[in-house]
Amino acid sequence: SRDLVMSTMAVSARSRSKAPCRVFFCTILCLSLLILPSRATKVCQTFQPLKRNQLNMGTTMVGSAAATFPRGGGAAKITATTAPAASSTPISSALILKSFLKTIADARSHLAAAAAARAVSIFSMYPVDTIKTRMQMKQGDAFRLSGLYKGCAGSLVGQVPYGVLTFGSYEIYKQALLNKFPNTKPALIYALSAILGDVTGSGWLCPSEVMKQQLQAGLYPSMSEAIKGIWSKSGIAGFYQGFTGGLARDVPFRVAQLTTFEVTKSLYLKAKKGRTGDDNAALSAVEAAVCGAAAGSFSAAITNPLDRIKTLMMTDTTNAYGGSVVACASKILKDEGIGGLFAGVAPRVGYIAPSVCIFFVTYEFVQQKMQKKE
């Protein structure tokens, strides 16, 4: 009977370790079944070329912002789009890939500038992110100087391609949803597409986040050691440890960010129109970035409990937090009370506004350089 119990426990442990992978692939499958019916629009023929004025910082679309701004600090303006007429041509995986590549090619100038800006903002603010991780793990000397940039290279490898993948998948989701639900408000379609783009991009981002946070926590001395250690303990599933925690943080964050941005933008425009007397007043690029920073900071604060849960799940090498969002939250509340959910909130909020400013300045600089070359 003892052997039977031990065997059952081993199977259960293996099942838990593979759960994040199953969740990710099941999520993508369900989304595909939802928005890509067998008799849907031929996506590659419905995409409209992206114009340069649509990619200006002050008028960046929701999905573009979700993809290219530092996570937690996006600013976006929702623009109206007319849904194209549906076609009876079936969609194939080759057409989806073709439309994705076309989307990336059409926006290559924007994405190149955004990738450079994203890399600079992440590198500049990385020590703050490390301090936040240490505080969330309740480490004694969170402000120690050693190891502040541990895992930075891996974070860049994950974050920069993540922006491209999220942007491209956002466009595909948006077009498919507009055709499937033509009578739905475009703003809702754009918001849902941005969230689905985040879910898709997380498949690429999660492994680098796991390695980054375990390096920040000092669990491994180097990136190569982290890869070897995670692989030897759990295989590929180990790189998706905490995947559900990441989704539990990112989806509410994206909803809060987009909603708060729209409210902030509306209040600012109302005040601006009253001050200038111009009923046609609009947000400038700088004003959009400021509103985005404010919205991102607020959203970061209210989703900090979910961010801490995600951090603990990704750094939990002994299954002390149960391997699920609910189990992790329950343990935090039991051991630390409600205050434990807000550990690290100051550096998390403090990370946002400077990231947006750095991103904005770098983006504009790179865009100007590229335009001169053209």
Image (tube, grey):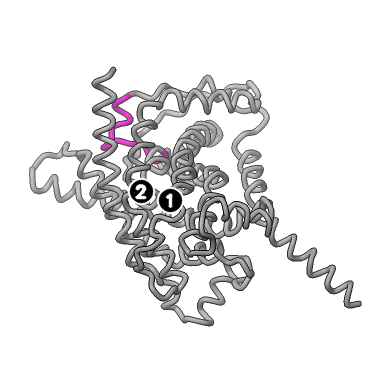
- From the viewer's perspective, is residue 216 above or below residue 356? below
Helix, strand or loop for disc 2? helix
Question: Hey, which quadrant is residue 344 in on the image?
Answer: bottom left
**Callout 2 amino acid:** Phe
Q: Is residue 65 magenta?
A: no
> Where in the figure is residue 8, as x and y percent of width and height?
83, 68
Residue drawn at (56%, 34%) of the image:
180
Residue bearing the label numbered 2: 123
Q: Quadrant of the C terminus?
A: top left
Q: Which of 212 and 282 is in front in this view?
A: 212
Do callouts 2 and 1 mark residues in contact (Cβ within 8 Å)?
yes
- From the viewer's perspective, is residue 73 above or below residue 57? below
Q: Nearer the viewer, residue 249 or 259?
A: 249
**Would residue 15 be found to the left or right of residue 53 on screen?**
right
The magenta span reads 52-63
Q: Say which label, 2 or 1, has the lower sequence index.
A: 2
Q: Does the magenta stretch include residue 54?
A: yes
The secondary structure making up most of the magenta span is helix
Q: How far apart are marks 2 and 1 (CA)?
A: 7 Å
**Would residue 106 be found to the left or right of residue 362 on screen?**
right
> Where in the figure is residue 276, as x and y percent of width and height?
8, 43
Residue drawn at (47%, 81%) of the image:
336
Question: Hey, which quadrant is residue 88 in on the image?
Answer: top right
**Callout 1 amino acid:** Cys
Furthest-left residue in this view: 276
Judge the density around disc 2: few (<14), some (14-19), many (≥20) Cα neighbours within 10 Å: some
Residue drawn at (68%, 30%) of the image:
38
**Would residue 115 be found to the left or right of residue 247 on screen?**
left
Residue bearing the label numbered 1: 152
> Where in the figure is residue 23, as x and y percent of width and height?
65, 53
